[in-house]
Image: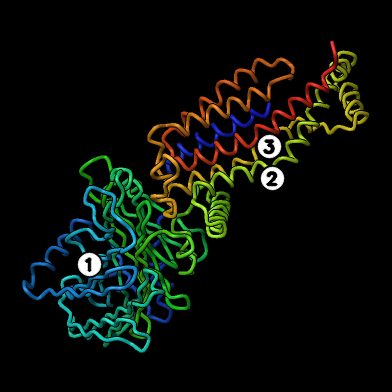
Amino acid sequence: MDKRFFLALFLSLIVIAISQLLFPPPRPVPNTRDVIAKDSGSTPKAAASSTETLVAKASTDTPSQSQAAVVSSKTAAPGTGETTTVSTPKAIYEFSNIGAAPVSIVMRDYKNRSPSGGLVDLAVAGSPLLRYRLVMPADTADLASVPFSLSRTKNINGEEILSYKALVKNLPISITYTVPTDTTASYAIRVEGRVEGVQGQSYLITELPRSLQPTEADTVGDHRTLAYSFKPQRDHARSVLFSGLDPGEKTLEAGPLNWVAVKNKYFVFGILAPTNGTPFSEVTLTGGPRTSKIATTAAASAVQAIRNNAFSFDVYAGPQESQRLMRMGRDFDHVNPYGWRFLQSVVHPIASKVIQALLWMHNRLRLSYGWVLVILGILVRLALWPLNQSTMRSSLKMQELQPKLAAAQKKYKDPVQQREAIMKVYHDAGVSPFAGLTGCLPALLPMPILFALFFVFQNTIEFRGVPFMWLHDISVKDPFYVLPLLMGASMYVLSWIGMRNAPPNPQAKMMGYMFPVMMTVVLLNMASGLNLYYTAQNIAALPQQWLLARERAKARPAG
């Protein structure tokens, strides 16, 4: 019974997941007027209405229009573009005075495994990582093509300060980047700006990268993971795949938002509102043009109100390391929300705890992540040992009661009398009528960790490139398919031992053959680390299954 229930649950989850992916529910689009009006505070009604129109217009440019602006910024002022480089122990940053924006971020500790090689650089050639637009009550200024003047200094903490200044529509504008350069630098920089002389409420629109460079050998798979993530202050973090946005489709996500980010499989580029400062009012997501079935470009424009002529936010451009993202605060470690949307509230907490446990074991035991996964699989089975013992003994008692239950059903035809007789049999034997259902628990309890690990292996950079025995990388599939086959074989042996000395059950026998085959097919091309964990768990369960089979044989009536 437990295997049939487990299979039904597993297949139901797969069907629901596929349905959600293929037919996502439509998202309601909030009214931009309401969002901006709420954010404007004391702005007069007439001025607010004018600003709303400008923001709506500025935040709905098509990708082709925005891309044309990037090209023009490169050609409008030939010879005036200057690139400034800032080196830190973790990254090499390049900034351009055209648009006062970062144009390259190279990570020293990570190799690019795509055919391009070299180190990981998040930027796409020819496109800045950030683009700014200033929305004022009576006008809009695109800063992407504006040449800024630069002054470079250091503060008392040794941080690099890049101050860009320009006069745009007779308004003094400054954008300053603070880059930590000591050994504690953690891929984060601070952005601050001022706009002088604006009458009425104004807004800064910050455009995130339209794509990220592929960094993995499987460039197609890396492109499939491209997504925008954002965190509403009063809701869970959400992620929208590029493939989930049709070309030209626009989705408005209302704020206030703590952060907005673009990510691929292992790396992320995000802008984070100050902890106690002005959040982002909204973000507009737009699907980009496609030259193939894979979506490689999209657009995201975040709106932030300018308060007291100033704006500020942080930029994180680096790996999706759990502990590093947690140190950024603002729930930025949820930038990759684990679990499909309908399972996120359940899967994400479990996945976070699993990651913390794996990191703790790795750091404390000083073992590779391969051995850590083996140990975790064994520990899960040891933790379930008492429950397995209890449920199996309940199952044995249920087998002993079957003749008495059948006799009671045969003796009493009246449903009420039959139910009373059956309950008396259970009571006299000291067995719960629900003992049969509890037999499903040992099979179901490990599943939350297995599901969590499925999502963990999708984006956890700590596993990237980790070798184990013949495996060159536990974050990708086993190239020789040894582990999936071993996992299926161990599952079959576990089922075979479990059916020994048990009453004949054709359905259970059929499931004993089908379920291992099904799980082997499901996990065949998944991360080898996931197969390693499941195999270790199956092998660790064999001794107990054998002991329980012996106990069942002793309890079986003779003859």
Q: Secondary structure at mark 2?
A: helix
Q: Earlier in the sequence, mark 3 or mark 2?
A: 2
Question: Which percent across, then down, holds residue 424?
Answer: 92, 27
> Measured along the vertical axis of the image, is residue 125 above or below residue 42?
above
CB contact under 8 Å: marks 3 and 1: no
Q: State the colouring used for the structure image.
A: rainbow
* Cα distance between the residues tagged 3 and 1: 53 Å
Instruction: Tell me the amino acid under the disc marked 1.
Output: Val
Of residues 222 and 101, the one nearer the viewer is: 222
Residue pictured at 15% horizontal, 71% vertical: 145
> Measured along the vertical axis of the image, is residue 465 above or below residue 489?
below
Q: Nearer the viewer, mark 3 or mark 2?
A: 2
> Measured along the vertical axis of the image, is residue 362 above or below residue 380?
below
Q: Which residue is mark 3?
A: 442
Instruction: Tell me the amino acid under the disc marked 3.
Output: Pro
Question: Which percent across, then down, holds residue 154?
Answer: 30, 86
The answer to whether one can see residue 414 in this image is yes
In the rendered structure, the answer to whether residue 364 lies left or right of residue 260 reads right
* Cα distance between the residues tagged 1 and 2: 51 Å
Q: Secondary structure at mark 1?
A: strand
* Corner quadrant of residue 197: bottom left
Q: Nearer the viewer, mark 3 or mark 1?
A: 3
* Corner quadrant of residue 93: bottom left
The quadrant the C terminus occupies is top right
Q: Which residue is mark 2?
A: 383
Q: Residues within 10 Å of mark 2 (few under 14, many from 20)?
A: few
Of residues 298 and 356, the one nearer the viewer is: 356
Q: Earlier in the sequence, mark 3 or mark 1?
A: 1
Q: Which residue is mark 1?
A: 103
Question: Which percent across, then down, holds residue 526?
Answer: 43, 38
In the rendered structure, the answer to whether residue 509 lies left or right of residue 213 reads right
